[in-house]
């Protein structure tokens, strides 16, 4: 039988500590909330009151339950008050010496059977535990912010944590209505180890002026369905906290360069730009602590004005290709009012593409998303051809043929001869260098990347990729077209993976390495990212959907260009692809899909 916890102590009443107090008190457990001074105690009390009052206002908590919750919480200054609790959880700032001092004191104050827990997100639980005479009763219980809302708890056992203590804490998590994943004491545990490499990479993209903060954040929200962009998330976490976590992970996690904090991060922390809590980080906020972003000197001017500046008029668009992507792009342009010339290799393929576009538009009508008259008008704007010569009078060409550089270069050389001057030539490549395609023409200034996401009619994001030869007018034209299509166009340089894939796939590769090292299971890693970070899918779910062969090809491209050891494809990923386990399409990837 698991131990029954009737009283719990919480040390440190910042946002996290106050949230943990609320979680315990909501679930009928008496809580002794402890701080270092009366003013700090009052701040903690105000945080708890504010959170529960908001829950009542939103209808998430009954007023009577709020009052009962507050009756279960007792406040005290100093650790001596914790002499008779069953469990203490510490939630003070991420400094090892501070936590070790607190644990040494708790060891003296608390009863011998009391469990001592730390909410650290990155420090070694083992190093904290050795400050006590009872390291077998020390454990990590890592809640996620905001603790009352987030379902995940990482339970972190050291090599000496007693199995009974682990079992008791797991049972407690279930009583609190949380999903726990139990793991060993390793830098960053699961969620932070996967999250912070990605966040640091996003900061380096911003630092190198590869893309704006707005475009990086929009790309990850719209391209991956993430609840927040990486830079807005850094502001929420706190840049000082992020710096400490990255620095700790770098030192404890094998000195992987991707965890070495980007220099800009240290500069911002030194300058007091800590994110929301200081009112200024990557973005500027209404006031310290406010979530409301206000314009500052880096805020882009209104899109319409910026886009119209130098953009060329586009009325007729050519789309070359016959795959799913080409079909979706034809539909998107036709629905937005453009005349479209579809060019495929042979009239048989044209007939197939025509049928696919009709089927998709008809589905829109059946679902009530599209009027019959609009469907008919869209189809009326499309002409079907098997000859590139029919692109002689278009204003924009979008290429969506196979991802082979030689094929694309040959196509662009032909377009160069056929198309009139001033036509913007766009490639939808997701992984090849756009400059290689551009240099197959005599007009590289007019060549741009337009990377649509699949399915093109639904996904709201387009990456606009400018090479070092792309003219400002071609970029402005591409952005204006995206706006007319009702898409969000994000502008970036011509680097492998652009924004989304360059940030997404190293994170997926890291998850594979974590599984390969037997640190955790695929299920627990997926749970951690969905419940701890609010991701719509866990990394292994996503890999099986994308296809392990596609993922491996993208990761190889990134590694080839950046030569960063941490980007080397995980051997397990390579082995699964070699074995033909490619994900859902072969009914077997990281999971067996044969019965689904």
Image (cartoon, rainbow, N blue to C red):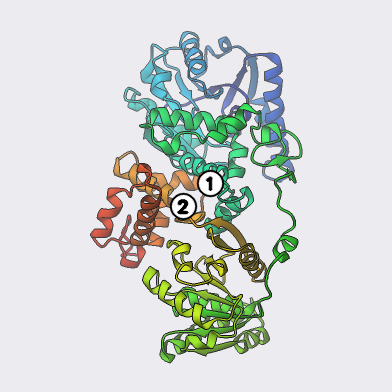
In the picture of the structure, the residue carrying the numbered disc 2 is 502
Q: Residue at x 44, y 34 (%)?
A: 188
User: For the residue carrying disc 2, how many other residues have a C-alpha within 10 Å: few (<14), some (14-19), or many (20+)?
Assistant: many
Q: Is residue 352 visible?
A: yes
Farthest front residue?
A: 442
| Residue 106 image point, x, y percent | 49, 13
Q: Is residue 19 visible?
A: no
Position of residue 433 relative to residue 288, above or below, is: below
User: For the residue carrying disc 1, how many other residues have a C-alpha within 10 Å: few (<14), some (14-19), or many (20+)?
Assistant: many
| Residue 386 image point, x, y percent | 46, 89
Asked if marks 1 and 2 touch (Cβ < 8 Å), the reply is yes
Is 570 left or right of 95, judged from the image as shown? left
Q: For mark 2, give the secondary structure.
A: helix
Q: Residue at x 56, y 34 (%)?
A: 265
In the picture of the structure, the residue carrying the numbered disc 1 is 205
Is 458 left or right of 292, judged from the image as shown? left
Q: Quadrant of residue 25?
A: top right
User: Mark 1 or mark 2: which is in front?
Assistant: 1
Is 357 left or right of 557, judged from the image as shown? right
| Residue 286 image point, x, y percent | 76, 39
Which of the image's four quarters has the C terminus? bottom left
Please tell me which of labels 1 and 2 falls first in the chain: 1
Q: For mark 1, give the secondary structure.
A: helix
Q: Residue at x 30, y 40 (%)?
A: 517
| Residue 45 image point, x, y percent | 69, 25
Q: Nearer the viewer, residue 179 or 437?
A: 437
Q: Total label count?
A: 2
Q: Nearer the viewer, residue 130 or 437?
A: 437
């Amino acid at each position: 039988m698991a131990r029954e916890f009737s009283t719990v102590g919480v040390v440190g009443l910042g946002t996290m500590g106050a949230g943990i107090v609320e979680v315990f008190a909501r679930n009928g457990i008496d809580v002794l909330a402890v701080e270092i001074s009366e003013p700090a105690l009052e701040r903690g009390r105000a945080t708890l009151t504010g959170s529960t009052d908001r829950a009542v206002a939103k209808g998430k908590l009954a007023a009577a339950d709020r009052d009962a919750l507050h009756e279960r919480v007792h406040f005290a200054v100093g650790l001596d008050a914790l002499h008779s609790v069953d469990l203490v959880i510490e939630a003070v700032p991420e400094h090892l010496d501070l936590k070790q001092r607190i644990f040494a004191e708790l060891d003296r104050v608390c009863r011998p059977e009391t469990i001592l827990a730390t909410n650290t997100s990155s420090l070694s639980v083992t190093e904290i535990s050795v400050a006590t005479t009872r390291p077998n009763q020390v454990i990590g219980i890592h809640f996620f912010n905001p603790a009352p809302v987030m379902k995940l708890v990482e339970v972190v056992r050291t090599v000496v944590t007693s199995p009974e203590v682990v079992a008791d804490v797991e049972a407690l998590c279930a009583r609190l209505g949380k999903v726990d994943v139990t793991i060993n004491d390793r830098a960053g545990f699961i969620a932070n180890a996967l999250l912070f490499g990605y966040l640091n990479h996003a900061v380096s993209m911003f630092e190198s002026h590869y893309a704006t903060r707005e475009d990086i954040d929009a790309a990850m929200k719209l391209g991956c369905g993430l609840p927040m962009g990486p830079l807005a998330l850094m502001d929420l976490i706190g840049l000082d906290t992020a710096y400490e976590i990255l620095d700790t992970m770098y030192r404890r996690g094998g000195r992987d360069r991707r965890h070495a904090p980007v220099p800009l991060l240290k500069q911002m922390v030194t300058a007091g730009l800590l994110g929301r809590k200081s009112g200024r980080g990557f973005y500027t906020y209404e006031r310290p602590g406010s979530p409301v972003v206000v314009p500052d000197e880096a805020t882009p001017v209104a899109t319409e004005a910026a886009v119209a500046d130098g953009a060329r008029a586009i009325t007729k668009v050519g789309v070359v290709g016959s795959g799913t992507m080409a079909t979706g792009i034809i539909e998107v342009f036709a629905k937005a009012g453009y005349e479209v010339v579809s060019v495929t290799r042979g009239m048989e393929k044209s007939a197939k593409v025509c049928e696919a576009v009709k089927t998709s538009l008809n589905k829109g009508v059946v679902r009530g998303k599209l009027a019959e008259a609009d469907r008919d008008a869209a189809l009326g704007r499309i002409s079907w051809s098997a000859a590139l010569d029919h692109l002689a009078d278009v204003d924009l060409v979008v290429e969506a043929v196979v991802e082979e550089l030689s094929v694309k270069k040959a196509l662009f050389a032909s377009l160069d001869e056929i198309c009139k001057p001033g036509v913007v030539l766009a490639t939808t490549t997701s992984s090849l260098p756009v400059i290689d395609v551009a240099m197959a023409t005599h007009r590289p200034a007019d060549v741009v990347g337009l990377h649509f996401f699949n399915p093109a009619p639904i996904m709201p994001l387009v990456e606009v990729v400018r090479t070092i030869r792309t003219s400002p007018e071609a970029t402005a034209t591409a952005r204006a077209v995206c706006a007319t299509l009702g898409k969000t166009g994000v502008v970036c340089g011509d680097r492998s993976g652009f924004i989304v894939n360059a940030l997404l796939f190293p994170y997926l590769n890291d998850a594979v390495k974590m599984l390969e090292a037997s640190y955790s299971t695929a299920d627990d890693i997926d749970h951690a990212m969905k419940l701890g970070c609010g991701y719509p899918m866990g990394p292994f779910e996503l890999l099986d959907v994308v296809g392990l062969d596609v993922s491996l090809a993208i990761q190889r491209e990134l590694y080839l260009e950046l030569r960063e050891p941490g980007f080397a494809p995980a051997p397990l990923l390579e082995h699964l692809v070699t074995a033909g386990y490619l994900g859902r399409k072969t009914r077997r990837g990281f999971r067996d899909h044969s019965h689904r």
